[in-house]
Image: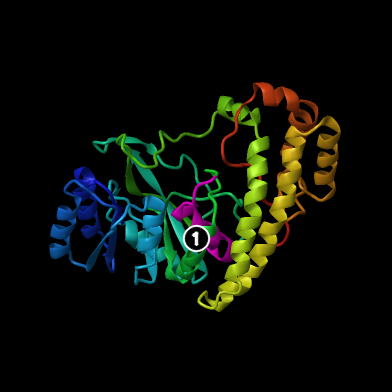
Amino acid sequence: MTTYNGAIHLQEQLASLTGQHFLPTELIVGDDGSTDGTIEILECFRREAPFPVVIHSNSIRLGYRANFMKIARLCTGDLISFCDQDDVWLPNNLDRVVGSFADPDVLLTFHNARVVDGQRHLISPLYAEPPSAFISPRLALPPWMSSYGFTQTFRADLLPAAALWGQMKDHYYPDEAMGHDLFFFLIASAVGKVCYIDDELTEYRLHGGNTVGTGKRTKPGMVERWRYRFEDRSETYGYLARVAPIDAELFSHLSKMEAFPKHLRQRSTEAAVAWRELGPIYSDRAQVCSARLIDRLVAFVHLCRKGGYSEASFWTFGSKAMIKDLVLGVVLAPLVRRLGRTSSRDDRSCRRGRCSQT
């Protein structure tokens, strides 16, 4: 758990930890310089908790990303769950999560949650529909997919990789360090299985002071889907083209890291190859959306020839994306760039093709 001036909601979260059917092995807390009553609440809880509680006070503020990464590396258990100071865990949270690791190849589990307001009144589920299958094999999920940290539990086998976190760039926020949750999801989904539990195991509180927050979750409607299609995505595709080689380099380093489990090092070599393939196809797709007409056409033909839209490829944008790129890219790119919405920082179209699973 990381804390920063969280006294107003912290006690409810701590009480929910002691109310777990399956108690935590320990609670490691990193406080980022709180000036309210947070430390006092934590110290009181430490004296009475039915499990060890260790509190680390940062001498300088790290920010939530670096703070979570620091605290994760101080955990001693086999499984590590991220815990936000202002949420509430349902009593069966850890019981359900721990059970999902019966398969030794599952490296990370995430779950659904209840989005609630400051008074814990229900707003909606976090996921209106399951974002993935119950079990996803390695390198099967969309490359830019992630999950919220407060829903995540991962094997301590992944912790040695944290030494490389500082070199990573976030997929969604250019020029910022990669989110702690994105970092472990990225690695877990590339070298092992990821499990999704559709049970709502946490109350995710929205109170106006969240560091990262989300509104009501619903299935994308027709208007939202069409607005997404008409975004000017040239900048996003160009950014992802630059990020993909950084991710590939991460896995290249992991394949040589002696502290990383041997079987995961071998899989990291394959992951490096897969991520390295992403860069060129995103470079071409950025060209399809932004360059001169002749360059847009050449990039589109290049993508078609090397399987960027084919289900037989490892990564594919799919046939619908091919039609979109032809019409809104090759033909209408100048109009979309002038009138389209600012691009969101993700890509929902890129996914694993139907080639054999690794």
Instruction: Report the number of discs.
Output: 1
For residue 26, side relative to residue 347 (left or right):
left
Q: Quadrant of the C terminus?
A: bottom right
Q: Nearer the viewer, residue 142 or 332?
A: 332
State the image coordinates of residue 212 (x, y, percent, origin top left). Answer: 39, 42
Residue 143 against residue 165 in the figure, above or below: above
Q: Secondary structure at mark 1?
A: helix
In depth, the one of 308 and 276 nearer the eye is 276
Q: Is residue 358 visible?
A: no
Q: Position of residue 97 (x, y in %)?
A: 39, 60
At horizontal 44% and vertical 69% (from top left) the residue drawn is 102
Q: In the picture, residue 301 is in which quadrant?
A: top right
Q: Main secondary structure of the magenta part?
A: helix
Relative to 217, is 339 on the left or the right?
right
Q: Give the residue number, with chain letter if any, for mark 1.
A: 165
The residue positioned 69% from the left and 58% from the top of the image is 276
Q: Considering depth in this image, is 20 or 346 the residue closer to the camera?
A: 346
Magenta-highlighted residues: 175-194
Residue 114, compared with residue 343, is above or below; it is: below
Rendered image quadrant of residue 314: bottom right
44 on left or right of 119: left
Q: Residues within 10 Å of mark 1 (few under 14, many from 20)?
A: some
Magenta-colored stretch includes residue 176:
yes
The residue lying at 34 percent from left, 40 percent from top is 210
